[in-house]
Amino acid sequence: MTLADETITALAAELAEAHRTRRVIPRITSRYPEATVEDSYAIQGVWRDARLAAGSRLVGRKIGLTSRAMQAATGITEPDYGVMFEDTLWENGAVIPADAYSNVRIEVELAFVLAAPLEGPHCSVFDVLRATEYVTPALEILNSHIELQGRTIVDTIADNAAYGGIVLGGRPVRPDDVDLRWISALLYRNEAIEETGVAAGVLNHPATGVAWLANKLHQHDTRLEAGEIILAGSFTRPVWVCAGDSVLCDYGPMGTITCRFL
């Protein structure tokens, strides 16, 4: 890491205040161009630990930047990750306050719900499938507290990988009942189709990102626990939404997810 501990703590507090007040702060990398990916995970960790100390309950993790196109656009060679707290979960059909978020976008994903712990350093796709109780359709709400213009991967990771919330719905399946690579989805905003995608767009298999995360967390002496929800990464581009928009995502045989922003 290149940033001093007090700088990391101050930036985590700044992001926490931005979350509380629903505002956007200047890019970290514009103020600290020397900041590294390790610094950004340290900032995220301080923010996470403060939330836990205040009584929030961690329910899972999100994985981002899992498509080759997004990795090429950001100049990185691996995904990123953030944490999900209980108060960020929304049910199918939810009415969601748009002003609870900044720079709101929607992504189409699959969520893995674990029946057993997953631990690196050699976790594979097959280990993920064995440890998974079920896989279910999910929409991720992206939420950015850092200005978007010129934003880098360091800014995104520090901002909890731009995670805002998750809407769960559709029909869950056991991982051995379907070829997860071929799950597809149609994303509509206000009844107009915006995006389509196939889950193989996530690193050729959506479980690949979950295995990567288990191995990454092993480097920090932690693991994924039974019961955690793991958002495996988007297989569409993010779609902008604002107050008044309705969203429907059709996963075919796996059902639909709907939500509305007010």
Image (cartoon, helix red, strand yellow):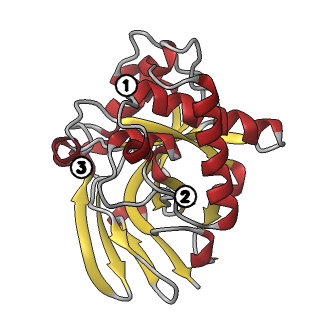
Q: CA distance from mark 3 to mark 2?
A: 22 Å
Q: Measured from the top left, where is residue 249 in percent x and y?
A: 39, 71
Q: Measured from the top left, where is residue 207 in percent x and y?
A: 36, 34
Amino acid marked by disc 2:
Ile
Vertical arrangement, residue 106 with respect to residue 213, above or below: below
Amino acid marked by disc 3:
Trp
Instruction: Kindly state the secondary structure of the residue where label 3 is placed.
Output: helix
Report whether 139 appears left or right of 99: left
Q: Measured from the top left, where is residue 186 in percent x and y?
A: 29, 70
Whichever of callouts 1 and 3 sits on the residue coming sooner in the sequence is 3
Residue drawn at 23 percent across, 44 percent down: 74
Report whether 10 appears left or right of 192: right
Residue 259 is at least partly visible in this image? yes
Q: CA distance from mark 1 to mark 2?
A: 21 Å
Residue drawn at 39 percent across, 54 percent down: 109
Instruction: Kindly state the secondary structure of the residue where label 1 is placed.
Output: helix
Location of mark 1 (residue):
212
Residue drawn at 63 percent across, 70 percent down: 100
Residue 87 has which mark?
none
Q: CA distance from mark 1 to mark 3?
A: 20 Å
Location of mark 3 (residue):
182
Report whether 182 appears left or right of 161: left
Whichever of callouts 1 and 2 sits on the residue coming sooner in the sequence is 2
Mark 1 or 3: the one toward you: 1
Mark 3 or 2: the one toward you: 2
Location of mark 2 (residue):
166
Residue 232 is at least partly visible in this image? no
Whichever of callouts 3 and 2 sits on the residue coming sooner in the sequence is 2
Amino acid marked by disc 1:
Trp
Vertical arrangement, residue 91 with respect to residue 138, above or below: below
